[in-house]
């Protein structure tokens, strides 16, 4: 779609245009040593010069003199907490004096929210969450409300981290769909591309300049470099058959010896959707609140049924996470549940690498 | 979907003690219009909400044509079910449902129907027995096999005795541990296959019970010549949302709450043979 150039010194005009259109803006900010999405009002709120260093079980931010706002790969958050809240009330029950129960649904207001700095992997993950929470079976009213007025400003990834493997999953590093605007950040400014009608409306307000040949060449070089820099990969796009043929592989036992079953991987995973019901009665006994909260297949309670835990050990739980993410997602959603963001590798306290574990189980089989 | 994701107020008409730990709640919606239009199929389940405590998925055991009340037979074992056991006539609770895919009753027309259950697995299947009994001419032989761990765990003993007196009905009950005057077999429910008169090509089989039992039973049935596609199983997993979203009930790529709980054997045979999936 329509493209143009926004010089770095005019970046604040994008924020102003979004504010004028009624959007509250979220963008990357450094909080407690990590880049997260938080409210931004002015361009100075963005993490100018911040670089991330990621490896298995490792995440650090370094401050550099670079003028860039988006020269980092990704923080622990994707879009997931914005659309699928970590905890939210579904309904409230009021108990009358005669014991009668009144149920009231509680849905969040559809807020006009713009998120700036969204990566290709996160857009791919959002498309998967859309398929889970919206669509054929009917919309989840809570997700639908948060999703309805979401304006997405993508940034093509220029600096994948050591743990990124979106090239292998086919989801990045360039954002190709699902955004309202996409930015390619260069030292001098931004190539702006619109991906929707409402994105085009905002872009038209910016009075963009023509994109010079030098800028186009620099953008192409940057995209190539982002692609070739990635060195991790999964052993294939569809591992369903390989994983389910190896449910008793010794690799599961081996990884269970390292895995702490802490659930960090499922929390940072942008596609994990499991959630538990949480009931909180009021102290006066007159009301009770029914909420949902993110859950993890690594928890003991996840597979509990009437006095029995189906997946009673870490081996079964790690196997569930990997066979679901890379295997049975194909049956449920027509593609893998992994978008190659690498978060589960960085944020694993013991540095378990999903690409290595998948390779072990899918390829190193001993049948005898 | 929205209609299904919010509970509606229901009232306990009666709480029936079935055994020291098993009870049946007989319920009606407080809103009589809602009650009148409420429909379910045998094998489907509701989410029962106990005020201030939470929800549990429980199969509906009553006959779908009974428009006065709907029944849930429950074992008091967890926080919610122990609380539900305290409810008395007139007490209120929340109900949302029905959910899931029930038993394949249209496919069973004209065939011999085998019901193989273990423990409280008899509850999701009893609605099929009642269904067949009320439409007896539409079905062939009815073969009821029920196993329990201990003789004291058997609920509905009187019904099994009554059914066993009916024509074209075989009732085979087993307890791993018997008791004085236990009239039936002592041993596993799967021992009973030797006594059942089965026409493999005419039979449709509906099972509900521990996965290990269903796995062994399916092998024995296939050895008797019953085709895999004639075998149906009701599966059980943690269910918290009941609409295919919360993820707890997954077995492989299946969501038990929406794809099941009743599955055709070929759909899940590779999954139930693996422990801890």
Image (spheres, rainbow, N blue to C red):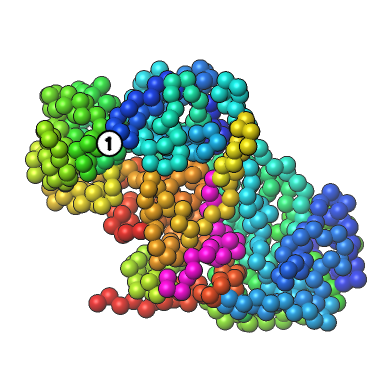
Q: Position of residue A237 (x, y in %)?
A: 49, 69
Is residue B1 found left or right of A59 in the rendered image? Answer: left
- The structure residue drawn at horizontal position 36% and vertical position 28%, both measured from the top left corner, is B24
Q: Secondary structure at mark 1?
A: helix
Magenta-colored stretch includes residue B258:
no
Q: Is residue A267 magenta?
A: yes
Query: Which residue occupies 27% across, 36% down?
Result: B122
Compared to residue B7, the image places residue B257 above or below, namely below
Which percent across, then down, holds residue A161? 65, 77
Q: Position of residue A50 (x, y in %)?
A: 77, 76
Vertically, is B245 above or below B273? above
The residue lying toward the viewer, choosing from A109 and A286, is A286
Q: Which residue is rendered at x = 15% and y = 32% of the image?
A: B171
Stretch in magenta? A256-277
Report how many numbered discs are placed on residues in the image: 1
Observer-nearest of A256 and A340? A256
Instruction: Residue under label 1, please give it.
Output: B122
Q: Visible in this render: residue A116? A: no
Q: Residue at x 40, y 17 (%)?
A: B68
A225 or B127, which lies in front? B127
Q: Is residue A24 left or right of residue B174?
A: right
Q: Nearer the viewer, residue B85 or B196?
A: B85
In which quadrant of the rendered image does the C terminus of chain A lie?
A: bottom left
């Amino acid at each position: 779609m329509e493209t143009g150039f926004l010089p770095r010194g005019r970046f604040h005009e994008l924020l102003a245009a979004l504010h004028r259109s009624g959007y509250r803006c979220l963008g990357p900010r450094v909080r407690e040593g990590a880049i997260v999405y938080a409210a931004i009002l002015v361009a100075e709120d963005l993490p100018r010069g911040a670089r991330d260093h990621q490896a298995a079980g490792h995440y650090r931010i370094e401050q550099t003199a670079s003028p860039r706002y988006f020269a980092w790969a990704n923080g622990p958050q994707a879009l997931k907490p914005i659309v699928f809240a970590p905890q939210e009330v579904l309904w409230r029950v009021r108990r009358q004096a005669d014991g009668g129960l009144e149920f009231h649904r509680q849905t969040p207001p559809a807020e006009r929210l713009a998120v700036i700095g969204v990566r290709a992997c996160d857009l791919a993950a959002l498309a998967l969450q859309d398929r889970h929470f919206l669509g054929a079976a009917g919309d989840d009213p809570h997700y639908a409300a948060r999703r309805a007025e979401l304006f997405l400003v993508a940034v093509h990834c220029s600096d994948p981290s050591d743990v990124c493997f979106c090239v292998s999953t086919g989801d990045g590093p360039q954002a190709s769909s699902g955004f309202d605007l996409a930015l390619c950040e260069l030292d001098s400014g931004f190539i702006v591309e619109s991906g929707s009608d409402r994105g085009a409306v905002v872009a038209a307000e910016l009075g963009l300049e023509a994109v010079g040949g030098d800028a186009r060449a620099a953008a192409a070089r940057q995209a190539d470099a982002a692609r070739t820099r990635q060195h991790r990969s999964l052993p294939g796009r569809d591992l369903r058959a390989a994983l389910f043929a190896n449910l008793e592989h010794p690799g599961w036992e081996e990884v269970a010896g390292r895995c702490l079953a802490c659930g960090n991987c499922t929390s940072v995973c942008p596609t994990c959707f499991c959630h538990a019901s949480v009931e909180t009665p009021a102290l006066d006994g007159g009301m009770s609140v029914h909420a949902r909260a993110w859950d993890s297949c690594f928890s003991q309670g996840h597979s509990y049924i009437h006095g029995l835990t189906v997946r009673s050990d870490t081996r079964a739980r790690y196997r569930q996470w990997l066979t679901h993410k890379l295997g049975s997602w194909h049956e449920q959603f027509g593609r893998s549940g992994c978008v190659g963001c690498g978060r589960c590798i960085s944020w694993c306290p013991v540095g378990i690498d999903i690409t290595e574990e998948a390779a072990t189980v899918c390829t190193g089989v001993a049948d005898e | 979907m929205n209609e299904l994701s919010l509970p509606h107020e229901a009232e306990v008409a009666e709480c029936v003690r079935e055994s020291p730990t098993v009870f049946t709640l007989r319920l009606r919606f407080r809103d009589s219009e809602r009650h009148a239009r409420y429909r379910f199929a045998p094998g489907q389940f509701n989410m029962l909400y106990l005020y201030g405590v939470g929800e549990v998925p429980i199969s509906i055991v009553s006959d779908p044509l009974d428009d006065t009340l709907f029944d849930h037979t429950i074992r008091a074992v967890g926080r919610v079910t122990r609380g539900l056991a305290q409810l008395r006539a007139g007490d209120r609770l929340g109900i949302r449902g029905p959910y899931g895919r029930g038993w394949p009753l249209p496919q069973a027309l004209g065939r011999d129907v085998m019901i193989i259950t273990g423990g409280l697995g008899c509850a999701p299947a009893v609605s099929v027995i009642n269904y067949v009994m009320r439409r007896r001419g539409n079905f062939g032989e009815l073969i009821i096999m029920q196993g329990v761990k201990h003789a004291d765990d058997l609920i509905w003993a009187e019904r099994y005795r009554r059914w066993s007196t009916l024509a074209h009905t075989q009732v085979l009950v087993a307890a791993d541990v018997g008791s004085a005057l236990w009239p039936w077999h002592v041993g596993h429910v799967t021992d009973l296959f030797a006594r059942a008169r089965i026409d493999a090509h005419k039979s449709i089989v509906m099972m509900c019970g521990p996965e290990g039992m269903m796995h062994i039973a399916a092998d024995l049935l296939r050895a008797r010549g019953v085709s895999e596609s004639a075998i149906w199983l009701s599966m059980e997993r943690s269910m918290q949302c009941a609409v295919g979203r919360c993820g707890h009930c997954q077995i492989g790529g299946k969501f038990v709450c929406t794809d099941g709980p009743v599955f055709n054997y070929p759909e899940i045979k590779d999954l139930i043979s693996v422990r801890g999936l």
